[in-house]
Image: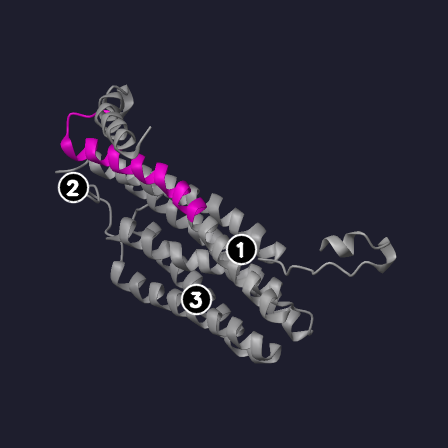
């Protein structure tokens, strides 16, 4: 406010310029939450790296334990990455017209659901082959890390399902879509790191 | 203190730190691979949060400048 304006009576003073928000409240909250989640996965990956290094020169995976199906999981990984790109398209479409975001949002959710389903199928097969949480440290880390990621993926899918419903009802705001999308981007971007460290 | 002295001090500190790290009883292993894993993961876990905070700070600075330019353009 200028000096001249400050000398005016309060009711005559011009309205201060409202500075737009730098980031939506929901997105900011989600970004802070994602920071903590990044550290959670970083801790698990670090523990995995140390345990794996202790077996350097020995067999990894340990004797009698099945090998992880990295080829099938590569397909799931591709589906997850594509879902992230499609969700980005949904956000761009929303800026033009909210209704145009419906198809990419649904597509991203379906691709995400496919990833979770395919990972679940893989788990069932691995359990059948004898890889369990207690069968070896290899199995423990696999189920801990991949399981933690799967829980996050399911939570994010629920969020995307909610966003799709709200969009259908015409109530979804850009900030809400951004909040849900931020969490899904985290789920998408952390997976390649887990895949490289755990599967390969 | 001028920059050259700060640099020298930083290098001296860097030269001293690895000895302290090796003094940690649970961070030591006879095998090279394991010692390296401890060092790499320590650096990773130490730098990751700093990197995230620095990244967020840089983004906020950039966004703030953009908002200032938008407000100036409106006036």
Label 3: chain letter: A
Circle 3 residue: A84
Q: Nearer the viewer, mark 2 or mark 3?
A: 3
Circle 1 residue: A155
Q: In this view of the protein, can residue A136 be seen by the observer?
A: no
Q: CA distance from mark 2 to mark 1?
A: 35 Å
CB atoms of marks 2 and 3 within 8 Å:
no
Q: Nearer the viewer, mark 1 or mark 3?
A: 3
Among numbered discs 2 and 3, the one appearing first in the sequence: 2
Q: Nearer the viewer, mark 2 or mark 1?
A: 1
Q: Residues within 10 Å of mark 3 (few under 14, many from 20)?
A: many
Task: Say whether residue B50 is magenta.
Answer: yes
Q: In this view of the protein, can residue A22 be seen by the observer?
A: yes
Q: CA distance from mark 1 to mark 3?
A: 15 Å
Residue A59 got which mark?
2
x then y, percent, for residue B22: 23, 23
Residue A135 falls left or right of residue B53: left
Where residue A19 sits, quadrant-wise, is bottom right
Q: How many marks?
A: 3
**Residue at image point 49% right, 49% down:** A34
Q: Which range is magenta?
A: B28-54
In depth, the one of B67 and A28 nearer the eye is: B67
CB atoms of marks 2 and 1 within 8 Å:
no
Residue B11 falls left or right of residue B72: left
Q: Are both tags, 2 and 3, on one chain?
A: yes
Mark 3 secondary-structure assignment: helix
x then y, percent, for residue A120: 41, 58
Label 1: chain letter: A
Specify the quadrant that holds the N terminus of chain A.
bottom right
């Amino acid at each position: 406010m200028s000096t001249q304006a400050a000398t005016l009576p309060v009711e005559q003073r011009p309205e201060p310029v409202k500075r737009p928000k730098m980031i939506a409240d929901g997105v900011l909250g989600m970004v802070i939450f994602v920071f903590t989640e990044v550290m959670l996965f970083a801790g698990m990956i670090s523990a995995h790296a140390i345990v794996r290094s202790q077996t350097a020169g020995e067999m990894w995976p340990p004797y009698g334990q099945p090998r992880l199906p990295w080829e099938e999981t590569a397909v799931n990984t591709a589906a997850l990455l594509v879902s992230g790109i499609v969700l980005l398209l949904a956000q761009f479409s929303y800026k033009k017209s909210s209704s145009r975001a419906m198809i990419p949002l649904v597509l991203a959710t379906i691709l995400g659901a496919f990833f979770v389903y395919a990972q679940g199928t893989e788990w069932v097969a691995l359990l059948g082959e004898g890889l369990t949480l207690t069968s070896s440290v290899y199995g423990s880390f696999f189920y801990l890390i991949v399981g933690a990621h799967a829980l996050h993926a399911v939570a994010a899918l629920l969020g995307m399902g909610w966003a799709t419903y709200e969009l259908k009802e015409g109530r979804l705001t850009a900030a809400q879509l951004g909040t849900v999308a931020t969490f899904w981007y985290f789920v998408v971007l952390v997976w390649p790191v887990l895949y490289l460290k755990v599967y390969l | 203190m001028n920059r050259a002295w700060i640099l020298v001090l930083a290098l001296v500190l860097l030269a001293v730190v690895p000895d302290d790290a090796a003094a940690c009883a649970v961070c030591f292993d006879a095998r090279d691979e394991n010692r390296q894993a401890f060092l790499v993961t320590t650096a990773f876990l130490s730098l990751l949060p700093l990197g995230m905070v620095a990244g967020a700070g840089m983004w906020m600075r950039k966004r703030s400048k953009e908002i200032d330019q938008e407000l100036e353009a409106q006036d």
